[in-house]
C-alpha cells in the first residue's frame, strides 16, 4: 500500500479522470474526499469507494468560490484531522475562436480551471504547512504547453496552472510540500467523446503511440506523484500523451 492512511482531496472527483484518480488512490490505502459541483454524483462515487474498503466523504464544492472551498477543507479536517494530498482535477472547456469568444466563455474557463486550482491550493496550504508535509498535483493539459486554435481560454488556464505549480513548488518546498502538474493529451472521456470523428482522426495522426490514453493512464502518474516514491520531485510537468509533445 503506497498511501496507507493518507487523506486525499480530489476536485471534480465524481466522474471522468477525477473518478479514476479517486479509485486508484483509494486502492493504495488513502481515504478519499470527492469534491464536485454535483453532490449526487459525488455521493455515488464516494459510496463506490467506501465499498472498496476505505472511508470516503462527498463534498459539494464549487472550486471557483473560495467561500465554499475553505469550509469544505475545514469539513475534511473535522472528519479526518488532516489533508495529505490535493489533486486539482476539476476542469471545463468552452471552445471558440478568439474573434467569437465571449467574455463569459473566457471567464468561466479561467475561473474553474485556474482560479479553482488557486483556491484549493490556498485552502490546503495552511494545514499542509502546519503538518510539514503535503503532495499537490494539478491536472493541466498538453494544450497548456502547445496552444490550440479555438481554445484560447483553456490553453491560457492550463499554462497558468503550470506556472502556478512551479511557484507553489518554490514557495512550499521548505515545508516539505511537493507540487507537480500532469499534462494529459487525448484521453478517452466524455470531454473528448464530444469531438467529431474528423477531429479525432486528425489528433490520432499526431500521437506517436497511435492510440488514445485512458483515465487510468493519468491516474497512474498521479498515484506516483502523490506517493513517497516521488518525494524528490517538485515543480515538474509530466505529460501523459502517447508522445504528442516531446520537449
Ligand atoms: P469531466 O468533465 O468528465 O469531469 C470534470 C469534473 O469536474 C466533473 O465531475 C465536473 O462536474 C467537475 N467540475 C466542473 N466544474 C467544477 C467546479 N466549478 N467545481 C468543482 N467541480 C467541477 O472532465 P475530464 O475527466 O475529461 O477532465 C478532468 C481534467 O483533466 C480536467 O481538468 C481536464 O481539463 C483535464 N484534461 C482532460 C483531457 C481529456 O482528454 N479528457 C485532456 C487533458 C486534460 P459536472 O459533472 O457537474 O460537470
Image (cartoon, grey):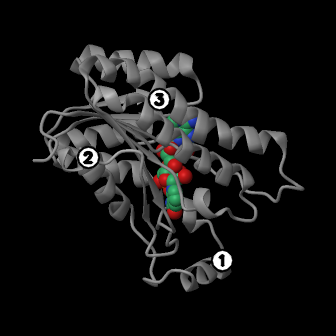
Q: Position of residue 81 (x, y in %)?
A: 22, 17
Q: Is residue 247 above or below residue 97?
A: below
- Callout 3 environment at 10 Å: few (<14), some (14 to 19), or many (20+)? many
Give the mark nearer the N terminus: 3 vs 1.
3
Secondary structure, mark 2, is loop
Q: Is residue 141 left or right of residue 229?
A: right
| Residue at 48%, 22% in the rendered image | 69
Q: Is residue 166 above or below residue 247?
A: above
Looking at the image, the residue that sits furthest to the right is: 99
Q: Of residues 218 and 246, which is closer to you in this image?
A: 246
Q: Of residues 195 and 130, which is closer to you in this image?
A: 130
Residue hosting label 1: 199
Q: Please tell me the numbered disc located at residue 232.
A: 2
Q: Nearer the viewer, mark 3 or mark 1?
A: 3
Give the mark nearer the N terminus: 2 vs 1.
1
Does the beta carbon of the residue at mark 1 sit less than 8 Å from ligand 1?
no
C-alpha span from label 3 to label 1: 33 Å
Q: Nearer the viewer, mark 2 or mark 1?
A: 2
Q: Is residue 62 visible?
A: no
Q: Is residue 190 left or right of residue 176?
A: right
Q: Please tell me the numbered disc located at residue 154.
A: none
Residue hosting label 3: 120
Secondary structure, mark 3, is helix
Q: Of residues 105 and 84, which is closer to you in this image?
A: 84
Amino acid at each position: 500500500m503506497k498511501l496507507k492512511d493518507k487523506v486525499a482531496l480530489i476536485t471534480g472527483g465524481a466522474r471522468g479522470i477525477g473518478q479514476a484518480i479517486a479509485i486508484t488512490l483509494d486502492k493504495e490505502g488513502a481515504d478519499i474526499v470527492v469534491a464536485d459541483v454535483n453532490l449526487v454524483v459525488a455521493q455515488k462515487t464516494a459510496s463506490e469507494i467506501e465499498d472498496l474498503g476505505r472511508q470516503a466523504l462527498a463534498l459539494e464544492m464549487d472550486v471557483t468560490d473560495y467561500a465554499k472551498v475553505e469550509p469544505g477543507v475545514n469539513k475534511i479536517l473535522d472528519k479526518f484531522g488532516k489533508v495529505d494530498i490535493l489533486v486539482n482535477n476539476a476542469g471545463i472547456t468552452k471552445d471558440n475562436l478568439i474573434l467569437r469568444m465571449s467574455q463569459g466563455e473566457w471567464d468561466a474557463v479561467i475561473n474553474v480551471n485556474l482560479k479553482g486550482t488557486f483556491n484549493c491550493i490556498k485552502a490546503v496550504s495552511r494545514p499542509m504547512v502546519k503538518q510539514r508535509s503535503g503532495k499537490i498535483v494539478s491536472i493541466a493539459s498538453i494544450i497548456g504547453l502547445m496552444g490550440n486554435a479555438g481554445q484560447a481560454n483553456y490553453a491560457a488556464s492550463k499554462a497558468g496552472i503550470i506556472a502556478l505549480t512551479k511557484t507553489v513548488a518554490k514557495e512550499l518546498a521548505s515545508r516539505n510540500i511537493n507540487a507537480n502538474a500532469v499534462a494529459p493529451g487525448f484521453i478517452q472521456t466524455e470531454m473528448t467523446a464530444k469531438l467529431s470523428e474528423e477531429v479525432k482522426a486528425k489528433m490520432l495522426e499526431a500521437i506517436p503511440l497511435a492510440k488514445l490514453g485512458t483515465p487510468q493512464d493519468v491516474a497512474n502518474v498521479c498515484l506516483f506523484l502523490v506517493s513517497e516514491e516521488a518525494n524528490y520531485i517538485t515543480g515538474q510537468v509530466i505529460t501523459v500523451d502517447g508522445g504528442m509533445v516531446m520537449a
